[in-house]
Amino acid sequence: MKTRFSFGLVLAVLGVACSSPMADDLGASREDVHESDPVVTLEAPAFAVDEAPVESEVAKAPLESALVFHTGGRPYLVLDEAPNLALALGKPEVVSAKDEGIYAVKRAVDLDHAAKAHVGAIGSRVRLRNATGAVCEAIVDGLAFVGRVSPDGEATTRWAGEGRDENDKPIAAPSRDELADEAWDMVDGSVVLAATLRPIGACKDATFATTRAMPTSAAITTADDTTSASALTALRAMPEYAQHATEYLEFARETESTETAARWEQHAEASPRVTTTTLDGARYVFVAAGTGAGCGDFGAELSVLFRETDHGLEVVRVLDGFTGELQGVVAGEEGVELVFPESHVGSKDTEVRRLEVRTYGCSC
């Protein structure tokens, strides 16, 4: 049996009470744990599903952050982004059919064969965060496989009870059970294993949690003018930026466009975002530049994390082909990882890991 990594550690660790200031800020405790109880230290092992085949062929290193997504009016904490669906039980259920055209469905989890770290998380209290810091706490009240799909126009119309057949006769809307079955068949590649959460407080803006009491950045704030100017100068000196600039000139020449901007990152009235934060006494500057006005138009994305030093800005991470609103910088054992809404990238990752919504049809 192959071994794969998951986010089981996130709640196995956060479910332990700890009285240190760092743990109070980043961790969580079970409702029935008291300060006098011993503190348990867990390592970061590779978790494998008990007695079940593993579908994923490529194992990825575990991250210190776990993503939060929202559907059906409640938050979910992602434990495994590529779970083994052989552990899914029962019929699918519709979670939401009203989230901006995105339908969400879920299935129960075989707790007898799921990873012990995941099952043991049930009942734990977790602290959720976003770019401003800790925003709320929540109780893990179960596990579920959750998938999301954005159907094409025909399915959307039919599911809403507005479909018509070849004779222009109305087609009855599917029952909720029929909709769940059809949607589940369409969510391939987007299903995650998630902890279902019962919020304590307002959690609607939460975007992530950390897997253990690892240092996490302070609030993300907009950079001042001086910092922004320095960061943009550093960005524009990078080879990745120069490559996009060349592509932009070629686009302008081939399309004979009269609406090109002075720089590619300003095309279609786009504007780079520069933010700052601190972590472990160091100040970080994040630049996100991206443009893409629509199908057939020029598009490019480039994001860079810099660290301020006595000699200027030092490049920490380059994310070519990606831009997003930074939610946090988390210290890992081999560097830092970056967290964005429904996306994150580990210190050794070459690509950003994103939560997928299975999309049908053309967006153009």
Image (cartoon, grey):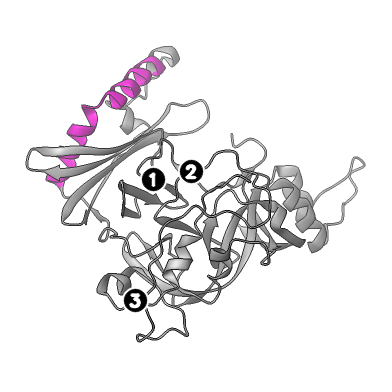
Q: Which mark is residue 60?
A: 2
Side of 304 where 55 appears, left or right = right
Question: Which residue is at 52% across, 42% downward?
Answer: 59
Which residue in the protein does label 3 denote?
18
Query: SS for tag 2?
Result: loop
Based on the picture, tell me whether residue 239 belongs to the magenta stretch: yes
* Relative vertical location of residue 168 with respect to residue 254 in this rendering, above or below: below
Picture coordinates of residue 303 (x, y %)?
A: 33, 38
Q: Disc 3 residue type? A: Cys
Q: Can residue 208 be seen here?
A: yes
The residue that mark 1 highlights is 346
Q: What residue type is labelled 1?
A: Gly
Mark 1 or 2: the one toward you:
2
Front residue (pair 211, 49): 49
Q: Which amino acid does label 2 sit on?
A: Lys
The crowd level at tag 2 (other Cα within 10 Å; few <14, some 14-19, many 20+) is: some
**Quadrant (top left/top right/bottom left/bottom right) for the C terminus:** top right
- Residue at 81%, 49% in the rendered image: 163
Kindly report the secondary structure that dominates the magenta region of the rendered protein: helix
- Label 1 with label 2: CB-CB less than 8 Å: yes
- Of badges 3 and 1, nearer the viewer stands 3
Q: Which residue lies furthest to the left in this view?
A: 310
Indicate which disc, 3 or 1, sits on the residue closer to the N terminus.
3
Dot 1, how many residues are within 10 Å of its Cα: few (below 14), some (14-19), or many (20+)?
many
Residue at the location (67% across, 37% down)? Answer: 361
Q: Judge by depth and name the residue closer to the eye, 351 or 16.
A: 16
